[in-house]
Image (cartoon, rainbow, N blue to C red):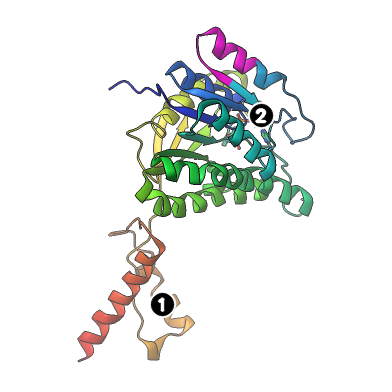
């Protein structure tokens, strides 16, 4: 089935450059009306300009599509609310939100200032919170919403010099996990993309011949599957250079230690049992873990009777 977004209204944050630009062009090419949000600053978040976002609007219109630009700083809730109000005034709904805007302030943790830590959290985490909050009740009322968070392998697995960025990128998955649960009854699905692409954000990290295969378009092809009518829910799609995979947190079955023996030594003695990966599970809610532990305790107590 061809994926299409006819009649849908999408907001793509950070859509003036790189991945966001590519996502916006792909959504528009398949029929979506798109809000091109971009503050237009430098890679480290300094400065502002509307040139890049206006150029994306021009490209979309040139191809017969519909788009508007908005320069909201995603870290500023009032500006984000203004963007959403203008979207509603123009097109009456918001079906898709792609939380993509981002900056870098890399330094080893020892050298990183608290201000640089907070700024990165503000743009990536609070930016995603602000934009999602501003569209959430609209999507609930519509009984339709598709939201995509942008995470990163740096958040899921770590990367030298990116404690601020990694913390923010893992945090958006925490946000996603609860929104999946709270949005389910209103047909709101929340997924995440973990991209790798050659953009200004990664320009000094990739040799030229490698950069050529890490296109933004390859990531956007995957992103489209996370925000159409048939989108999955709670899916973390990793995409780069044509490679696609799923990332997920699994928990081992673990072990049980009765109350009278719950010492640190007893826990350490069972280390290999509690880390055994055979039979591991991916939970749908935090409560599932407590249920597992209660089951173990109940099974033990029954065996003692
Ligand atoms: P980019 O620097 O090319 O584009 C980011 C865009 O976000 C820029 O146009 C910038 O003006 C905009 N932006 C920054 N702060 C903003 C704010 N406060 N409000 C509104 N717009 C703002 O970077 P790229 O590579 O396209 O990154 C897009 C997303 O993908 C980011 O969230 C990034 O962390 C994530 N990502 C990228 C990877 C890559 O390999 N390029 C790897 C993993 C994640």
- Residue 296 on image: x %, y %: 29, 76
Question: What SS does tag 2 mark?
Answer: loop
What residue is drawn where x is 40% and y is 21%? 6
Give residue 269's mark: 1
Label the magenta part by its dominant secondary structure. helix
Check residue 218 for magenta coloring: no
User: Is tag 2's residue or tag 1's residue first in the polypeptide sequence?
Assistant: 2
Above or below 205: residue 247: below
| Horizontal and vertical percent position of residue 46 | 78, 34
- Mark 2 close to ligand 1, CB under 8 Å: yes
Rendering coords of residue 168 (x, y %): 61, 49
Magenta span includes 57: yes
Residue corresponding to mark 2: 38
Q: 277 or 19, which is in the foreground?
A: 19
Ligand 1, image quadrant it occupies: top right
Q: Is residue 222 above or below residue 120?
A: above
Question: Visible in this render: residue 286?
Answer: yes
Query: In which quadrant is the C terminus drawn?
Result: bottom left
> What segment is highlighted magenta in the picture?
55-67
Of badges 2 and 1, the one in the foreground is 2
> Observer-nearest residue: 247 or 53?
53
User: x, y (%) of residue 128?
Assistant: 58, 44
The answer to which of 300 and 117 lies nearer the viewer is 117
Tell me the number on the disc at residue 291. none
């Amino acid at each position: 089935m061809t994926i299409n977004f006819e009649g849908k209204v999408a907001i793509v944050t950070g859509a003036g450059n790189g991945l966001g630009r590519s996502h916006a062009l792909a959504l528009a090419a398949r029929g979506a009306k798109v809000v091109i949000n971009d503050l237009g600053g430098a890679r480290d978040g300094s400065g502002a300009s509307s040139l890049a976002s206006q150029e994306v609007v021009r490209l979309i219109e040139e191809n017969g599509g519909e788009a508007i630009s908005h320069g909201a700083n995603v870290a500023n809730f009032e500006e984000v609310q203004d963007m959403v109000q203008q979207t509603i005034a123009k097109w009456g709904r918001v079906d898709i939100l792609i939380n993509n805007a981002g900056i870098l302030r890399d330094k080893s943790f020892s050298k990183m200032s608290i201000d640089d830590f907070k700024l990165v959290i503000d743009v990536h985490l609070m930016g995603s919170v602000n934009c999602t909050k501003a569209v959430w009740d609209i999507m609930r009322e519509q009984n339709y919403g598709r939201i995509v968070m942008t995470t990163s392998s740096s958040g899921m697995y770590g990367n030298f010099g990116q404690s601020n960025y990694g913390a923010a990128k893992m945090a958006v998955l925490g946000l996603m996990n609860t929104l999946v649960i709270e949005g389910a009854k209103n047909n709101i699905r929340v997924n995440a993309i973990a991209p790798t692409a050659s953009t200004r954000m990664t320009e000094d990290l990739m040799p030229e011949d490698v950069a050529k295969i890490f296109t933004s378009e390859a990531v956007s092809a995957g992103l489209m599957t996370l925000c159409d009518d048939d989108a999955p829910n709670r899916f973390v799609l990793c995409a780069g250079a044509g490679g696609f995979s799923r990332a997920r947190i699994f928990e081992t079955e673990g072990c049980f230690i009765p109350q009278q023996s719950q010492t640190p030594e007893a826990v350490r003695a069972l280390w290999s049992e509690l880390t055994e990966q055979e039979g591991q599970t991916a939970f749908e809610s935090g409560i599932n873990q407590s249920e597992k532990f209660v089951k173990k305790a109940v099974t033990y107590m029954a065996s003692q009777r």
